[in-house]
Amino acid sequence: MDKLVTFYNVEIQMSGTYETSPHFIAQIATDLGAVQNDIDELETYSAKISFKSTVKPSDMRNRVRAILAMYHMTLYYIDVIYLFENEMTPDKFCFWADGHEVEYHGKIIFEEDK
């Protein structure tokens, strides 16, 4: 049986005046299970990584917690949107370095074109 593929879109926000660096974000990407080519944006204080993985969202939560524990002084939060390959609605979680965690469930809303 094939493992289910999950698409991840991760936003990393630095804390205070800490700035990103290509090496630092590449290390976080590796810790998440992504590669350097998956880094979409590298801004002064934030970065975005998009990748697909067979890692379950519950395991990804544990990876994010471990990253925040390791870099709690330099990271403010990590926001993760995920979508299973056979679904159309994403879900999301956002974990802060202070231990605060929030879960979100996506939904689709159709609005009439005007």
Image (spheres, rainbow, N blue to C red):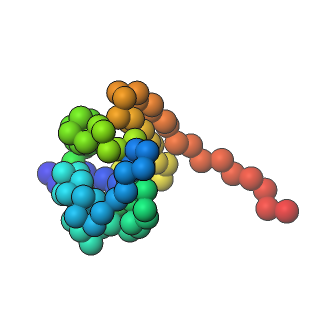
Above or below, comparing residue 23 to residue 14 in the picture: below
Quarter residue 62 falls in: top left
Above or below, comparing residue 82 to residue 61 in the picture: below
- Of 89 and 10, which appears nearest the observer? 10
Q: If the image is split into quadrants, where does the C terminus sit? A: bottom right
Residue 76 horizontal/vertical position (percent) = 40, 41
Residue 106 horizontal/vertical position (percent) = 52, 42
The residue sitting at 25% across, 42% down in the picture is 71
Q: Using residue 6 as the reference point, say whether residue 30 is left or right of it.
A: left
- Of 81 and 96, which appears nearest the observer? 96
- Of 66 and 72, which appears nearest the observer? 72
Question: Hey, which residue is sitting farthest front in the picture?
Answer: 17
Question: Hey, which residue is sitting farthest right in the picture?
Answer: 114
Residue 23 horizontal/vertical position (percent) = 22, 64
Q: Using residue 4 as the reference point, say whether residue 106 is left or right of it.
A: right
The residue sitting at 37% across, 51% down in the picture is 18
Does residue 54 appear in this view? no
Q: How many marks?
A: 0
Q: Using residue 50 as the reference point, say whether residue 24 is left or right of it.
A: left
Above or below, comparing residue 20 to residue 89 in the picture: below
Does residue 109 appear in this view? yes
Residue 19 horizontal/vertical position (percent) = 37, 57
Above or below, comparing residue 9 to residue 61 in the picture: below
Question: Hey, which residue is sitting farthest bottom in the picture?
Answer: 37
The residue sitting at 43% across, 64% down in the picture is 43
